[in-house]
Image (spheres, grey):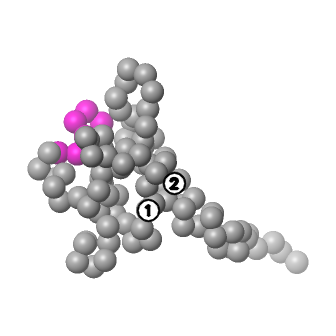
């Protein structure tokens, strides 16, 4: 994917992770999510361009993978569609 111009972004908590609140998603991105119990396998981490994490508070170290995926897709969409204004998001067509 990188050879085709995509950034490969792992959603994982590591010592070098960037907070999703501080990360600027590139327009061409592939998001890698790990399993709920074990995260992204250690052998895959070196293949990623960056690890991004969703900050959490409290004792629990992980969110359900579907929740994390939804948060990440929302943030990507917010950065690339919503911030360009409403013109970037086609309005629903209403009948005359």
- The residue positioned 30% from the left and 51% from the top of the image is 51
Query: Is residue 34 visible from the viewing direction of this image?
Result: no
Q: Is residue 34 above or below residue 56?
A: below
Q: Nearer the viewer, residue 51 or 22?
A: 22
Secondary structure mostly taken by the magenta-highlighted segment of the chain: loop
Determine contact: label 1, label 2, CB under 8 Å: yes
SS category of the residue bearing label 1: loop
The 10 Å Cα crowd at callout 2, few under 14, some 14 to 19, many 20 or more, is some
Residue 74, position as x, y percentages in the image: 53, 53
Query: Is residue 80 visible from the viewing direction of this image?
Result: yes
- The residue positioned 25% from the left and 72% from the top of the image is 2
Residue 52, position as x, y percentages in the image: 35, 49
CA gap, disc 1 and disc 2: 8 Å
Q: Which residue carries the number 1 mark?
A: 25
| Magenta residues (range) | 36-41
Question: Which label number is shown at residue 3?
Answer: none
Residue 4, position as x, y percentages in the image: 27, 79
The residue furthest top is: 59
Q: Nearer the viewer, residue 37 or 9?
A: 9
Residue 22, position as x, y percentages in the image: 46, 51
- The residue positioned 31% from the left and 77% from the top of the image is 5
Q: Is residue 76 part of the magenta span, yes or no?
A: no
Q: Which residue carries the number 2 mark?
A: 75
Left or right of 27? Residue 89 is: right
SS category of the residue bearing label 2: helix
- Quadrant containing the C terminus is bottom right
Where residue 1 sits, quadrant-wise, is bottom left
Left or right of 78? Residue 31 is: left
């Amino acid at each position: 994917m990188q050879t085709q111009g995509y950034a490969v972004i792992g959603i994982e908590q590591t010592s070098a992770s960037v907070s999703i609140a501080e990360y600027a998603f590139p327009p061409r991105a592939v998001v890698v999510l790990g399993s709920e119990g074990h995260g992204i396998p250690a052998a895959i981490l070196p293949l990623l361009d960056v690890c991004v994490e969703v900050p959490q508070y409290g004792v629990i170290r992980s969110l359900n993978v579907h929740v994390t995926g939804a948060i990440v897709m929302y943030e990507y969409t917010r950065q690339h569609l919503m911030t360009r204004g409403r013109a970037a998001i086609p309005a629903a067509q209403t009948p005359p």
